[in-house]
Image (spheres, rainbow, N blue to C red):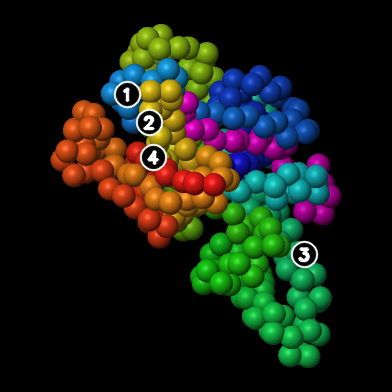
Amino acid sequence: MALTTGIVGLPNVGKSTLFNAITQAGAESANYPFCTIEPNVGIVEVPDHRLQKLTELVQPKKTVPTTFEFTDIAGIVKGASTGEGLGNKFLSHIRQTDAILQVVRCFEDENITHVHGQVNPVEDIEVINLELIFADMETVDKRIQRIEKLAKSKDKEAMAELPVLQQIKEALLQELPARSVELSPEEKKIVYGLHLLTMKPILYVANVSEDDLLEGTNEHVESVREYAARENAEVIVICARVEEEIAELDGEEKKAFLAELGIEEAGLDKLIRASYSLLGLATYFTAGVQEVRAWTFRKGMKAPQCAGIIHTDFERGFIRAEVVAYDDLVDAGTMAVAKERGKVRLEGKEYEMKDGDVVHFRFNV
């Protein structure tokens, strides 16, 4: 599934350093604003211990992990919604993403100049969020102007859309994001086409120094957590510089480096999974001697739709899905034993796929 999270932040917060670590793509990283002008796109494997275990059980010819896409977007500045900095170009890049990962500077370093002169992560967050709100306000106002007359003339679609837009406008006027407005699934569909920036789910990444990484927090991180809690957003604490070093290591070297730092898991692994979860994504597996593979799907999707992720013919000619839960398969040791125990089920078109399902699709075209 081609879904992407946009990495945003003020200049010099460690955003491109983080992107380099995520993708090992070597995006330019420099101590001045706008070193990232065109958005860099990188694809990263989603860490999942279950894939390795299935590989051990099945012994396939190859193993293919599922992936997730990150887009590194140029640093925003105050006034972007009115054209400052990269202005509308920056905003258009965010519109093309499905979620926002906002990197916040939570470290002190006199060698890296802060765009506002001092480290204040909450102020940084508010600068970016307000620019997104201002941009959404313009979008909503234009749309309201277009449909008000239609609503007065009893156009059914306009009459349904107008009150939703008015609710969102009221929230924006109070400097609240559009996602803070409680909307029904039908109402969300109404505004989906507007691609509102503040409707996108958000994850805050507190970029700390190596010393503070070992502590797990500092006063800046705590202020970010307090802010995020008000909008039920998650905060991930990382040190982008350390993660960039970790990303260059493999296998035992990586484990040894993490152990030396006193860290059980790389921050990027947590970040990738959090971004994956942010979009309501889950993983199912196919497992055979030719290939063990992880596939990404949206929670709530039914078996035929998930089959279509592999190939459209699988969805078009879907007959049924042969499904076993990951835990049941691992406990059984082999698919044959899992079948003997009655753990392998035949599911039809209405079956809602679960995270960790190991599945074989039956189809006919």
Residue stretch rendered in magenta on the structure: 64-86
Query: Which residue does the numbered mark 4 point to in the structure image?
Result: 360
Mark 1 or mark 4: name the one nearer the start of the chain. Answer: 1
Q: Is residue 362 visible?
A: yes
Q: Nearer the viewer, residue 217 or 7?
A: 7
Q: Position of residue 230 (x, y in %)?
A: 46, 58
Query: Three-letter amino acid code at disc 1?
Result: Val
Mark 2 or mark 4: name the one nearer the start of the chain. Answer: 2
Q: Position of residue 270 (x, y in %)?
A: 42, 34
Which type of secondary structure does the marked residue at label 3 adopt? helix
Query: Which residue does the numbered mark 2 point to in the structure image?
Result: 287
Which type of secondary structure does the marked residue at label 4 adopt? strand
Spatial CA distance of label 2 from label 4 is 8 Å
> Could you say which disc has been placed on residue 138 in the image?
3
In this picture, is 104 found above or below 186?
Answer: above
Q: Are marks 2 and 1 in contact (CB under 8 Å)?
A: yes
Q: Are marks 2 and 4 in contact (CB under 8 Å)?
A: no
> Could you say which disc has been placed on residue 58 in the image?
1
Q: Is residue 213 visible?
A: no
